[in-house]
Image (tube, rainbow, N blue to C red):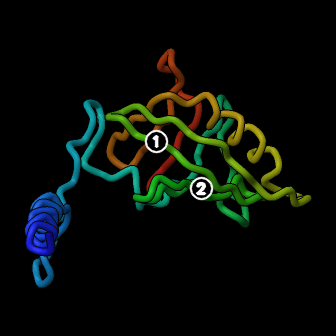
């Protein structure tokens, strides 16, 4: 009985080791970037600070607290509309992007308050993105640009 358990334990261990993901101790993982979706450049959506330049049909003026978004490789998004901070999540599938619930602070500010609300509202309607050079556009289902950014 003990011998059967030992053989079973060994087989399970071998299977788990063979099916593991990631490098063996001492190996270096070689990062493989996913192919850029059609209509995008090699610049990464993730781990780039994206300065908000336009929300809807309104250009964003220079402010003391620069409105931006940053997308992490852990599928989190954070930033500011110029007044309030925001944080949330997102999912990518090629050039499709979907934002999860976005939470934000509720500070009273002299500047930036006219960007905060429209930016948060626009994120809820985004369905895809496009990167051209240093510019990011978040688009709705009809392909209309909701928010424009410049890489910083």
Q: x, y (%) of residue 98?
A: 51, 35
Q: Dot 2: within a 10 Å radius of its alpha carbon, few (fewer than 14), some, or many (20 or more) residues?
A: many
Farthest residue, direction front: 1
Task: For the N terminus, give its image quadrant.
Answer: bottom left
Q: Dot 1: within a 10 Å radius of its alpha carbon, few (fewer than 14), some, or many (20 or more) residues?
A: few
100 relative position to 65: left or right: left
**Residue at 61% across, 28% down:** 125
Pick whichever, 63 or 81, lies toward us.
Answer: 81
The part of the image, by quadrant, that contains residue 41 is: top left
Pick whichever, 35 or 151, lies toward us.
Answer: 35
Farthest residue, direction top: 142
Compared to 8, does 114 lie above or below?
A: above
Which tag, 2 or 1, sits closer to the chain's start? 2
**Residue at 56% across, 39% down:** 99
6 relative position to 136: left or right: left
Q: x, y (%) of residue 130?
A: 39, 35
For residue 132, the mark is: none
**Residue at 36% across, 35% down:** 93
**Residue at 41% across, 31% down:** 96
For residue 68, the mark is: 2
> Callout 1: helix, strand or loop?
strand
> Callout 2: helix, strand or loop?
strand
Residue 30 in sight here: no
Q: From the viewer's perspective, is the residue at label 2 or at label 1 nearer?
A: 1
The Cα–Cα distance between marks 2 and 1, rounded to whole angstroms, is: 19 Å
Q: Mark 1 — residue?
A: 91
């Amino acid at each position: 009985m003990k011998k059967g358990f030992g053989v079973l334990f060994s087989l399970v261990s071998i299977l788990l080791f063979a099916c593991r993901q990631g490098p063996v101790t001492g190996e270096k993982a070689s990062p493989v970037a996913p192919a850029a979706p059609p209509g995008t450049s090699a610049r990464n959506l993730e781990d780039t600070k994206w300065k908000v330049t336009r929300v809807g049909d309104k250009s964003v003026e220079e402010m003391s607290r620069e409105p931006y978004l940053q997308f992490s490789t852990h599928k989190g998004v954070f930033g500011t509309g110029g007044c309030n901070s925001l944080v949330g999540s997102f999912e990518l599938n090629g050039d499709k992007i979907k934002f999860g619930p976005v939470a934000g602070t509720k500070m009273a500010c002299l500047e930036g308050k006219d960007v905060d609300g429209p930016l948060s509202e626009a994120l809820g309607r985004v369905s895809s993105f496009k990167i051209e050079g240093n510019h990011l556009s978040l688009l709705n289902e009809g392909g209309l640009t909701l928010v424009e950014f410049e890489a910083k």
